[in-house]
Image (cartoon, rainbow, N blue to C red):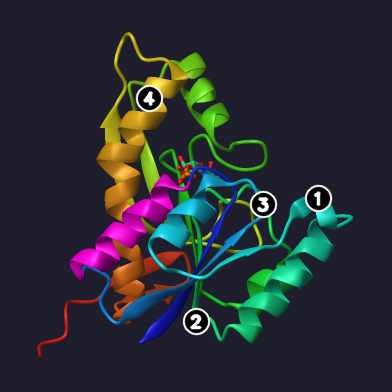
């Protein structure tokens, strides 16, 4: 069984999708062992509590910079013997050292079709504001491995979602979550735990299900 830590900063609907998938038995060979929040007030912590998953706070405000935050997170993850780190609405860019400590073992969900609307400054609702302002007709979500480059790691799964004429950033955000993020993230996590993701440079190969 792979031990999964989910890093969160806010509402935690993607965490909820993982919790629900686990309850259905859809996360094969993995268990959510910890939820770590960068904010003590994140509703995601309440979701963890309700699901009997240990929740921890490593608060951004307690550290001088991202470097110090990353080191504290690393200590926690090592102490918890974590195999897979999932960034589910985690709003801080982690350091190179952090990424190297978990090579191809950190997943992130991003609310756009990378390489569009991604990188520094593209997080949360801002992503959808920018997509609407650009006038794209299709957006979506991406689950990718985390590398040193912000939103630049190998792509695992993507799903497109149509933009509607009357969309606001909020309606687009919600539809992308419902139609894409909440489906892709549990699926990618399960594929990782089943050892079905093979990374070759930028390309992620999805291996067939092993026969029982
Ligand atoms: C999600 O849309 C996620 O893709 C996005 O923040 C939201 C978090 O919602 N993440 C990023 O923008 C990271 N660059 P949640 O807390 O309800 O899961």
Q: Are marks 1 and 3 in contact (CB under 8 Å)?
A: no
- Residue extent of the magenta highlight: 12-25
The answer to whether residue 205 is magenta is no
The answer to whether residue 70 is above or below residue 163 is below
Q: Secondary structure at mark 2?
A: loop
Mark closer to the observer (3, 4):
3
Q: Are marks 3 and 4 in contact (CB under 8 Å)?
A: no
The answer to whether residue 129 is above or below residue 43 is above
Q: Earlier in the sequence, mark 1 or mark 3?
A: 3
Quarter placement of the C terminus: bottom left
Mark closer to the observer (1, 2):
1
The answer to whether residue 17 is magenta is yes
- Left or right? Give the position of 178 relative to 106: left
Q: Which residue is mark 2?
A: 83
Residue farthest to the bottom, as pictured: 212
Q: Which residue is mark 3?
A: 40
Q: Which residue is mark 4?
A: 172
Quarter placement of the N terminus: bottom left
Q: Secondary structure at mark 3?
A: loop
Q: Residues within 10 Å of mark 1 (few under 14, many from 20)?
A: few
Q: Residues within 10 Å of mark 2 (few under 14, many from 20)?
A: some
Q: Which residue is mark 1?
A: 61
Is the CB of the residue bearing disc 4 within 8 angstroms of ligand 1?
Answer: no
Find the distance from the CA under tag 4 to the CA under tag 1: 30 Å
Q: Nearer the viewer, residue 147 or 28?
A: 28
Q: Earlier in the sequence, mark 1 or mark 2?
A: 1
- Left or right? Give the position of 29 relative to 6: left
Q: Earlier in the sequence, mark 4 or mark 2?
A: 2
Where does residue 79 sit, x and y in percent of width and height? 65, 85
Residue farthest to the left, as pictured: 212
Where does residue 31 sit, x and y in percent of width and height? 37, 77
- Left or right? Give the position of 73 relative to 129: right
């Amino acid at each position: 069984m792979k031990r999964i830590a989910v890093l969160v900063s806010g509402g935690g609907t993607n965490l909820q999708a993982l919790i629900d998938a686990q309850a259905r038995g859809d996360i094969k060979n993995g268990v959510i062992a910890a939820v770590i929040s960068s904010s003590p007030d994140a509703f995601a912590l309440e979701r963890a509590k309700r699901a009997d998953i240990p929740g921890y706070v490593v608060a951004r405000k307690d550290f001088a910079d991202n470097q110090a935050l990353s080191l504290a997170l690393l200590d926690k993850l090592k102490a918890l013997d974590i195999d897979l780190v999932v960034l589910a609405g985690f709003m801080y860019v982690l350091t190179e050292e952090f990424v190297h400590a978990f090579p191809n073992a950190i997943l992130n969900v991003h609310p756009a079709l990378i390489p569009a609307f991604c990188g520094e400054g593209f997080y949360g609702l801002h992503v959808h504001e920018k997509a609407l302002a650009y006038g794209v007709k299709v957006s979506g979500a991406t689950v990718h491995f985390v590398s040193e480059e912000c939103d630049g790691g190998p792509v695992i799964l993507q799903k497109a979602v149509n933009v509607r004429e009357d969309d606001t950033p909020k309606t687009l955000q919600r539809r992308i979550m419902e139609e894409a993020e909440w489906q892709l993230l549990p699926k990618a996590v399960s594929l990782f735990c089943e050892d079905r993701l093979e990374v070759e440079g930028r390309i992620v190969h999805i291996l067939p299900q092993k026969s029982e």
